[in-house]
Amino acid sequence: MKKRPFYLIYDGDCTLCENFKNAVKGLDLNSRIHPISSQDPLAKKLLSHMDQETRMGSVHLVLPNGVVKSGDQAVPQILQLLPWVSPLGWLLEHLPGSRRINPLLYHILSSQRGNFEP
């Protein structure tokens, strides 16, 4: 039986998001994560419960069981799927205080989206 993939959904019109997607692809040695631009019809279907602003506002990870993790909740999960950086993902999810720090870090990084445009 074929395993269902993890879907990384990102804003395909955002240079920072594209760079993140490319980094994930480069580190995904087992090809477990399938990146899809949030403009893609499949992304719209997978995130049909979200309005366009929410869908475009952050990175999303759709788990094989259909559960969606977004933004600061998605990043540690994504990193844990990548062999070379999985310990960092584990730390971001389990370190004391991470539930307060991760949203702040994600906000700081995502607020720089416009600064990475060509």
Image (cartoon, helix red, strand yellow):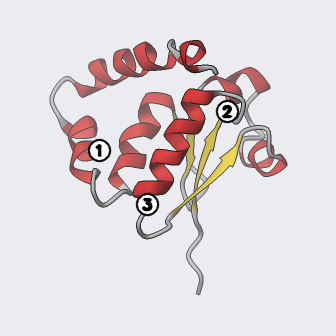
Image quarter in which the C terminus is found: top right
Q: Which residue is painted at 68% across and 49% down in the image?
A: 36
Judged by depth in the image, the label closer to the viewer, 2 or 1, is 2
Tell me residue 93's x, y (percent). Answer: 28, 38
Direction from residue 20 to residue 79 in the image, left or right:
left
Check disc 1: other Cα within 10 Å, few if <14, some if 14-19, many if 20+. some
Name the residue type under label 1. Gly
Q: CA distance from mark 2 to mark 1?
A: 22 Å
Quick one: label 2 or label 1, which is nearer the N terminus? 2
Along the line of sight, the residue nearer the viewer: 92 or 85: 85
The image quadrant of residue 18 is: top right
Image quarter in which the N terminus is found: bottom right
Q: Which residue is painted at 50% across and 19% down in the image?
A: 110
SS at mark 3? loop
Q: Which residue is painted at 77% across and 26% down in the image?
A: 51
In the picture of the structure, the residue carrying the numbered disc 2 is 11
Quick one: label 2 or label 3, which is nearer the N terminus? 2
Direction from residue 114 to residue 87 in the image, left or right:
left
Q: Are marks 2 and 1 in contact (CB under 8 Å)?
A: no
- Image height of 91 relative to 104, above or below: below
Check disc 3: other Cα within 10 Å, few if <14, some if 14-19, many if 20+. some
Along the line of sight, the residue nearer the viewer: 12 or 87: 12
In the picture of the structure, the residue carrying the numbered disc 1 is 89
- Image height of 94 relative to 84, above or below: above
Tell me residue 66's x, y (percent). Answer: 61, 54
Direction from residue 113 to residue 84 in the image, left or right:
left
Q: Which mark is residue 28?
A: 3
Name the residue type under label 3. Asp
